[in-house]
Amino acid sequence: MTSQKERIFSGAQPTGQLHIGNYLGALKNWVALQDEYEAFYCIVNLHAITLPQDPKTLREKTLDLARIYLAAGVDPEKSTIFIQSDVPEHAELTWVLSCVSRMGELERMTQFKDKGKGNRERAGVGLFTYPVLMAADILLYQTELVPIGKDQKQHLELTRDLAERFNRDFGETFKVPEPFIPPVGASIKSLQDPEKKMSKSDENVNGSIFLLDGADTVTKKIKRAVTDSGTTIEFDDSRPAIGNLLTMYHLLTGKTIDESVEHFRGKGYGAFKTELAEVTIEFLKPFQERVNQYDDATLSGILSTGAKKARSIAAQTLGDVYKKTGIR
Ligand code: TRP
């Protein structure tokens, strides 16, 4: 039976600690999309080694990330959850696509320039070809929509270019995917600097509320969050710190932005922060309990079922690619 639903694909790397910005900006949307779409949610462990990782903990972090997807509400009955390296077609298609990619277009990727710290001589080749692996992830599943953050938009443009070029040169093979960038909360900012995105790689841990932070830590971090001058709790372009905290409140409570502003009318920063800390803890507590809802055997069953399902589709696409290119 073939599904009538459109397909979506997204993924996250098993590096660093996931924070509430990852949940509100990405995972929460994944969960919302899984009823309407046929969803594939991947743990991209091959992407992780484009920067040095500790081999002793990478596997553990990979499984932890699967637990976090599940705790967030990604339902293995509805969505396909799998580990990238369990589907070898990702690496295989990357090779073919890298033969279609151009040095010039990869050199224009801003993330490569950032992560490579501008040092071309020492930057890893994997870091350079990272977007080609991401294109393979997406194109293998004939994906229609790709939920991503703004920072990944350029990689999706590249994916579209590669798909179109391949289709032109070898005949219609890949669906050309569209980005799906959620309107609000796409980018929760650092609690310490509202000009910067809340980031897994930020060395200042006080900027982020991690999904596994305990209640005391959460309260402390929110109390320490920078605020703007002024006293009212409102949206105003000149007061990005308060806007960021209000956005968190709005997304965590499900109250509209207007309702949130109304709720805090006449209250001060102290009361606002206390309440934001409370709703954050209220969300995190059951979330953290759900992280441990499955034992190891059940988790590994979910992941191997996911990989099998993913592989049955990926193998078809790769077979077609090999036929069209004369490899098979
Ligand atoms: N590059 C993405 C990130 O760092 C992760 C990723 C890998 C991804 N493959 C993907 C996201 C495919 C969407 C689709 O956020």
Image (spheres, grey):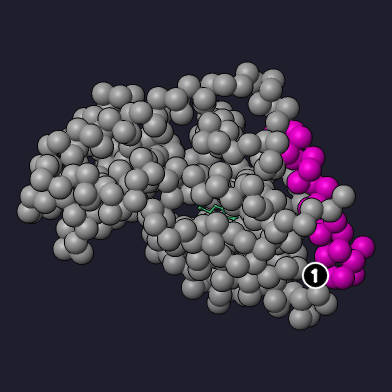
Residue visible at 53% across and 40% down in the picture: 14
Quick check: is 292 in the magenta stretch?
A: no
Quarter occupied by residue 276: top left
Q: Is residue 205 left or right of residue 158?
A: left
Q: Quadrant of ligand 1?
A: bottom right
Q: Is residue 130 above or below residue 159?
A: above
Residue visible at 43% across and 50% down in the picture: 25
* Front residue of this view, candidates 262 and 122: 262
Span shown in magenta? 303-328
Task: Tell me the SS state at disc 1.
Answer: loop
Which residue position is annotated with label 1?
Answer: 173
Q: Is residue 74 left or right of residue 256?
A: right
Residue 298: % across, % down: 69, 22
Residue 66: % across, % down: 59, 34
Q: Is residue 290 above or below residue 109?
A: above
Residue visible at 33% across and 34% down in the picture: 280
| Image label count | 1
Residue 95 seen in the figure: no
Q: From the image, give the main secondary structure of the stretch colored magenta.
A: helix
Residue 210: % across, % down: 37, 35
Residue 147: % across, % down: 55, 57
Q: Is residue 55 left or right of residue 184?
A: right
Q: Amino acid at mark 1?
A: Thr
* Front residue of this view, candidates 215 and 246: 246
